[in-house]
Image: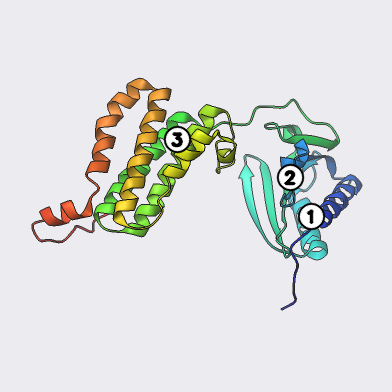
């Protein structure tokens, strides 16, 4: 196997510049824009490339996609790609062999515009910007208590890896609520390190430091406390309805209690 070095900033910017030149030369591309950190001039050593391409009307979308995909594998040593969709916009995310992430998004002509603050037009014309969709607080709250139900059932069944997995899902939604309230990026943990020290400490306390039942239960209790505090700030009436049942989830999550009280001494494995 050939040795491959991790990409450098200079290599990344060379590839970015070459792709912009190629986009300008492609008659099927009516515009292009930088997305992500390059759009706001905040790239660092580990930034990726995020380039939006606007397709002119009536072009063969599949052919454009094939041609640009072929270019990435042929000229830039792509080893894999993965597609994400937002409506009619296709984001094709490439992994290069030097570990550089390269995102090419293909936009219908009528939809080419800023969605959120990280959009910098390179050439062509863009429509009026629209705000990026924000996560709904009610959805985050609902997903958090749904995960909490499965934290409890996993703990009482002594399924500790599953308990940690469910706790992570609960925590992700709770921390998104904190980020949303404090005006930092709420999804994928992007804003967590931009919180004030006090909020970062709270976020860290929600982490389970081991798979020991006592530690998982501690992290569950802390995460529940934070969830209820966020619900009180968002919807006090809903908090008053939820709190008794959610507190009961934590107090009833001890495996030993339910194992001892089981008539057969065995836990049900029903899901």
Q: Residues within 10 Å of mark 2 (few under 14, many from 20)?
A: many
Decide which of tag 2 and tag 1 comes sooner along the chain: 1
Q: Which residue has dot 1 on it?
A: 68
Q: Which residue has dot 2 on it?
A: 106
52 or 204: nearer the eye? 204
Tell me where residue 11 appears, x and y as whole percent: 83, 57
152 over 141 or under it: above or below:
below
Residue sitting farthest toward the bottom: 1
Decide which of tag 1 and tag 3 comes sooner along the chain: 1
58 or 84: nearer the eye? 84
Instruction: Label 2, secondary structure: give it.
Output: strand
Decide which of tag 3 and tag 2 comes sooner along the chain: 2
Of tags 3 and 2, the one toward the viewer is: 3
Q: What colour scheme was applied to this rendering of the protein?
A: rainbow
Q: Which residue has dot 3 on it?
A: 140
Whether residue 154 is visible here, answered yes or no, is no
Query: How far apart in space, not on screen, are marks 3 and 2 (Cα)?
Result: 30 Å
Q: How many marks?
A: 3
């Amino acid at each position: 196997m050939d040795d491959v070095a991790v990409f450098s900033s200079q290599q990344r910017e060379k590839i970015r510049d070459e792709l912009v030149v190629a986009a300008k030369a492609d008659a099927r591309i009516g515009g292009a824009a930088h997305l992500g950190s390059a759009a706001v001039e905040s790239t660092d050593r580990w930034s990726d490339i995020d380039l939006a391409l606007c397709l002119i009307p009536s072009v063969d979308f599949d052919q454009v996609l094939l041609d640009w995909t072929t270019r990435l594998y042929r000229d830039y040593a792509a080893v894999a790609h993965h597609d994400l969709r937002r409506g009619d916009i296709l984001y094709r995310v490439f992994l290069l062999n030097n570990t550089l992430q390269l995102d090419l998004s293909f936009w219908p002509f009528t939809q080419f515009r800023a969605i959120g603050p990280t959009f910098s037009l390179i050439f062509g014309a863009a429509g009026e910007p629209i705000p990026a969709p924000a996560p709904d607080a009610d959805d985050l709250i609902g997903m958090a208590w749904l995960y909490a139900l499965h934290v409890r059932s996993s703990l009482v069944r002594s399924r500790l890896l599953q308990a940690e997995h469910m706790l992570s899902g609960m925590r992700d939604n709770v921390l998104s609520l904190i980020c949303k309230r404090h005006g930092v990026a709420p999804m994928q943990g992007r804003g967590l390190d931009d919180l004030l020290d006090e909020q970062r400490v709270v976020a860290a306390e929600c982490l389970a430091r081991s798979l020991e039942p006592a530690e998982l239960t501690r992290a569950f209790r802390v995460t529940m406390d934070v969830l209820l505090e966020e619900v009180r700030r968002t919807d006090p009436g809903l908090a008053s309805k939820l709190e008794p049942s959610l507190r009961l989830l934590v107090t009833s999550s001890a495996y030993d209690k339910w194992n001892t009280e089981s008539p057969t001494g065995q836990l049900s494995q029903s899901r």
